[in-house]
Amino acid sequence: MKAMVYRGPYQVGVEEKPEPVIEHPNDAIVRVTLASICGSDLHLYHGMMPDTRVGTTFGHEFIGEVVEVGASVQNLAVGDRVMVPFNVYCGSCYFCARGLYSNCHNVNPNATAVGGIYGYSHTCGGYDGGQAEYVRVPFADVGPSVIPDWLDDADALLMTDALATGYFGAQLGDITPGDTVVVLGAGPVGLFAARSAWLMGAGRVIVVDRLDYRLEKARAFAFAETRNYEHYRDIIVELKNATDGLGADVVIDAVGAEADGNRLQHVTATKLKLQGGSPVALNWAIDGVRKGGTVSVLGAYGPMFSAVKFGDAMNKGLTLRMNQCPVKRQWPRLLEHIKSGFLTPSDIVTHRIPLDEVADGYRMFSGKEDGIIKALLVPSGS
Amino acid sequence: MDPYTAGTERPPFDAEALRSRIPGWGADSDPADRPSSPRERFDPAASGAHWDVPERQAGGDDRERSIEHRQLTPVFGTTSPLRGVSGVIRRFAYDNFSEGRAAHWLLLIAGDRVEAMGARFERDPVRAAAPWLIGAAAVGALVSLRRGRRG
């Protein structure tokens, strides 16, 4: 089969790989009909995630058709059109039993601090991802769901991570009616977090980024006020000015490990790999939120240490909330919101790229070229 | 509202204006409508798992694992198993250091770089070797220049 293959930092391509096989009685094999490049795939592409092995296929956002099931699979059948959460999880460990599906303890031998994620390095379990024609889906009875007939492919695809994660981030903010919510980052997850903040009753939503075309999308799609941090000498002062000197009630970090905005942090993290991630956005969240406020972290960071301004977080009495999203928990409510028109996920899709051109897709996404916000990957047979 | 005075309990805002401008405004303002609230909810049946303990995936005798795990997890990824010099480095990291130690992660990153360099040589040896050859030639030229001056 054809699959995206990682060859080293900034080096990806499409190669022939053996088709995946059933390796566990509750596995399914899914023929991928639509996948995408997530912003967090760029951390792998840039060589920031430890134990990212040459030959691995990335891709944790995908949907497809079930073509084979293992002997113990009861809930899926060959031919089902399914969406697959980015989490690989067992459904029965201590953490899954409490709904923490993203923190499963039974699927990732390489690390205990993170659960399993498709196509996201051996640090996340060593599973191949969905930027391929076929993918192995473990625990087929707990992860995937049949896509409702009325749901569009692109909307279903975005349910598998970006939409669910953005919505989850707004929840982590514990927003109360009238709150001022600042979202750092106007990528797909930030846009969905901003839009979801309104559902939770936010009184104001302000999105911060440095790319004007994305801020324009934040205004049109997420009905948000926007700030381009490059237009201000000090974005923290601007955020304080915009909130009567208080700071925002809630700040959501939807940027993560490769944040710009501070050259020292950016270089030590993304170029020299001396930190688990550049914590610029996280530090701005800590400084931009009001005392007693809540910081919600959706941005992905590597497992190493980062230079976080923890003293300010402590002194301000902040609540810091974060996690990888337990995707499937969000789905019933998200389906209701899509059906009622409250959420329109596929509005953020800007590009559809054939799987054969995945290298161009990564280069374009990494360089933020051509107004790219969300790129879908289409395997050749779809 | 400002930080120097008490203000009101909640900031004033116009809910009706927001509701008319933004689709679904306030639909999930009650935390009970938020699917991840509360964060932890003990309900083993909710996931759809029909096992107490998952069956074990075959193989895995030589599979590397974090020393914080007491056993190999019942299911694991099988792509790109450890091999070569990078495999030795990575296995050393897994076998000797917990996830809490910087050495664990720095060794894994070192393994990544070694593997990527090897892959580059396998794919295109001339191009991969070019920077090294140019560097060696430059050093050689400098050395002979200094020797020439001394002579």
Image (cartoon, rainbow, N blue to C red):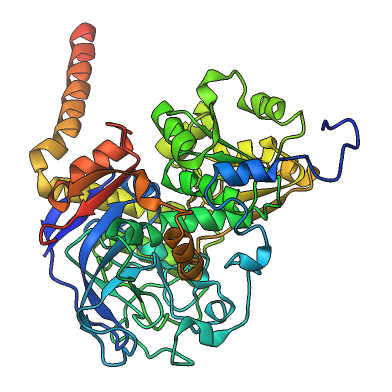
Residue A202 location (% of width, % of height): 65, 46
For the N terminus of chain B, the image quarter is top right
Image spot of residue A65 (x, y percent) = 22, 72
Q: Residue at x 32, y 72 (%)?
A: B77
Above-or-below relation of B19 to A174: above
Q: Position of residue B138 (x, y in %)?
A: 19, 21
Residue B5 image-quadrant placement: top right
Relative horizontal placement of residue A160, taking residue A208 as reference (left or right): left
Q: Nearer the viewer, residue A161 or A118?
A: A161
Query: Is A11 positioned to the left or the right of B111 in the image?
Result: left
- The image shows residue B41, relative to residue A4, as above or below, that is below
Of the pair A92 and A328, the residue shown nearer to us: A328
Give me the residue at 10% from left, 43% from top. B125
Q: Quadrant of residue A128?
A: bottom left
Evaluate whether residue A60 shows in this view. Answer: no
Look at the image and tell me in which quarter the C terminus of chain B lies: top left
Q: From where the camera sits, is residue B66 visible?
A: yes
Instruction: Please give left or right for residue A42 compared with residue A261 in the image.
Output: left
